[in-house]
Image (spheres, rainbow, N blue to C red):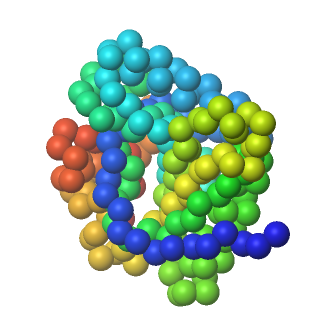
Amino acid sequence: MTSPAVQFDQVDSVPVAVIRRQTSASELSRVVPQCCGLVWNAVRAQQTRAGRHVAIYWDGSIRLEVGAELYGPFAEEGEVVRSATPAGPVAWTTHLGPYSGLGAAHDAVRQWCRANNRQLAGPNWEIYGHWQSEWNTNPLQIRTDVYYLPLDAARCGRVAQFESGCGEISSHGFLPPIHCKSVPGIISSYPCL
């Protein structure tokens, strides 16, 4: 099996509705779909246009935000809150196949970063393609895009044009909110660097 091709591009921040969790690697296959479903129900109840499902991994302790891209207004409801994906230069690849094979895509991006002298900033995220009926019979067509943010982008202040709003860590253990200038009104839990 060949490694997926890794690309280096500039991406914009995307507003998302998410549920925040901290979990273990062994629980991801349960937590991610569960949270996606809960977020989708909240978005649908507000009749807000939404896009693909997203999982943002903020650090190695698996603090994550799971939900859906937003294409319209959304009012936070209970544990479903607004956030945004990071923006700036990213190393990324597309994984085609069952979710159980995503590790190879993550490995390919990390190896590319090492080979190209790019340190990782911490956050990485997955954007899951809209489910297609043919994926039920041919799971090799399931599409997931995997993104990593390099540390050099964060140090240069190009990470989603975030403006520090550092305060106290909330009771659920997430980092203080940071205001995203590129998506007005969005507050993300991106760490202060």
> Does residue 25 show up?
no
In-front residue for pair 135/23: 135
Q: In the picture provided, is 29 more to the left or to the right than 72? A: right
Residue 27 position by quadrant:
top right
Q: Quadrant of the N terminus?
A: bottom right
Where does the image place residue 132, in percent across and percent down from the top left? 61, 36
Tell me what residue is drawn at x 61 percent, y 56 percent: 60
User: Which residue is at the front of the view, 161 or 73?
Assistant: 73
x and y percentages locating residue 124 in the rendered image: 52, 57
Which quadrant would the C terminus be assigned to in this image? bottom left
Q: Quadrant of residue 189?
A: top left
Residue lying furthest right: 1
Number of marks in the image? 0
Residue 136 in picture, x, y percent from top left: 74, 34
- Residue 61 in sight here: yes
Identified at 25% across, 41% down, the residue is 186
Identify the residue at horizontal 54%, vertical 29% (top origin). Answer: 36
x and y percentages locating residue 108 in the rendered image? 67, 71
User: Relative to 30, is 25 above or below?
Assistant: below
**Residue furthest to the top:** 45
Lateral position of residue 87 relative to residue 72, left or right? right
Write the residue at 61% across / 86% down: 115
